[in-house]
Image (cartoon, rainbow, N blue to C red):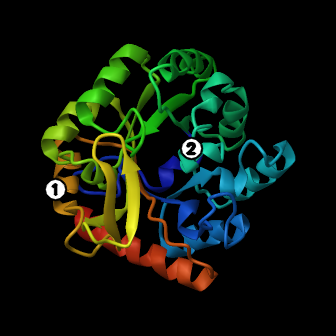
Amino acid sequence: MKAGWSVFQCRITGFAFMYLSVSVRIVEASCKTKLNVPAEEFIGIVKQGGASAICMRASGAGVEAGPERRQTLASKIASANLPVTMVTADYNVPLNNAKGPDSLRDIRPSLDVAEAFDCELIRVCMKKEIDITFARQAADLAAQRGIRLAHQCHTSSLFEEVDQMLEVLKEINRDNFGIIYEPANLLLNGQDYGIETLQRLAPHIMNVYVQNHRLDPEGPEVLDTYCRGPVRFHHLYLWETGGVDFTQVFQGLRAIGYEGSFTIHQAQGIETTQAATEYVKSCCRFFRQQTGAY
């Protein structure tokens, strides 16, 4: 059991060990390679905002940060009694670019990052069939260190559509390789994200990421997909209606007995400590309303 988990165990009626984590992405610059707020301040933001854990990305500290920087930050996070639920160790993974899968070809630096943060889960990227072979190899190396790998339900990847991602997981065939369930991206890809899908994905879910989008052919935001071409949409706050139906999401998570991190992963581009703290507080209120947490 990771340090700090006792803080949030058994707080949530009907969700034995489900807890709220916040990704550094909420204070990440649009380039996805740096933070608008120092990582040390982000620790206090999460704590003051009322969340229970942190999701770390390379913008905070990854493979390029160096071991001393990672260890310093990890010590401060541990002192705050906030476990790190997952690391995205390489810039190219969240950028989802052509180099995104490269970390699978040499997973050791990412494993070092995970170990530095006392974290057992790493997010990876797969875009082509050839990546499956490297995913197997990376999973085998990760297993030697007791670490798991997971791929987010994501646009322009092998994990866009439910049927396809299940086939890819079958081909990888490693117990320590799974899925980050992300309903907003499933929505963009024209997929069901409710109870039926959660039941199909349940054996493979290792994390839950949440953000909120509303589909609109004239929307200001656009993402390319393999399955539908360009998809336009609006960013919404989690609690706004017209996008992801979070009643369905929480009902589905309850139905499968999900135990683990529920991670706020909304790209906010927040630039001040006060704004970030208020946002985390709002997310905590949303989480409590949906789960009955106290």
Q: Crowding at label 2, few (<14), some or many (≥20) Cα neighbours within 10 Å? A: some
In the rendered view, tell whether residue 266 sits above or below residue 250: below
**Is residue 252 positioned above or below 141 on the image?**
below
Q: Position of residue 132 (x, y in %)?
A: 47, 19
Q: Residues within 10 Å of mark 1 (few under 14, many from 20)?
A: some
Q: Quadrant of the C terminus?
A: bottom left
Judged from this view, the residue extending furthest toward the right is 68
- Alpha-carbon distance for marks 1 and 2? 31 Å
Q: Residue at x 55, y 77 (%)?
A: 276
Query: Residue 100 — which label?
Result: none
- Select label 1 or label 2 by which is in front: 2
Foreground residue among 227 and 237: 227
Instruction: Name the residue located 69 percent from the left edge and 62 percent from the top edge.
Output: 34
Residue marked by disc 1: 248
- Above or below residue 266? Residue 160 is above
Question: Which amino acid type is marked by label 1?
Answer: Gln
Quarter of the image holding residue 156?
A: top left
Which quadrant holds residue 44? Answer: bottom right
User: At label 2, which amino acid type do we have?
Assistant: Asn
Residue 188 coordinates in the image, percent (x, y): 29, 53
Measured as percent of width and height from the top left, residue 68 is found at 86, 47
In the image, which disc is placed on residue 97? 2
Q: Nearer the viewer, residue 242 or 205?
A: 242
Residue 42 horizontal side relative to residue 70, left or right: left
205 displayed left or right of 193: right
Identify the residue shown where x is 35% and y is 50%: 18
Q: Secondary structure at mark 2?
A: loop
Q: Image height check: is 77 above or below 278?
A: above
Pick the front one: 252 or 34: 34
Q: In percent of the image, x 54 and y 20: which residue is there?
A: 139
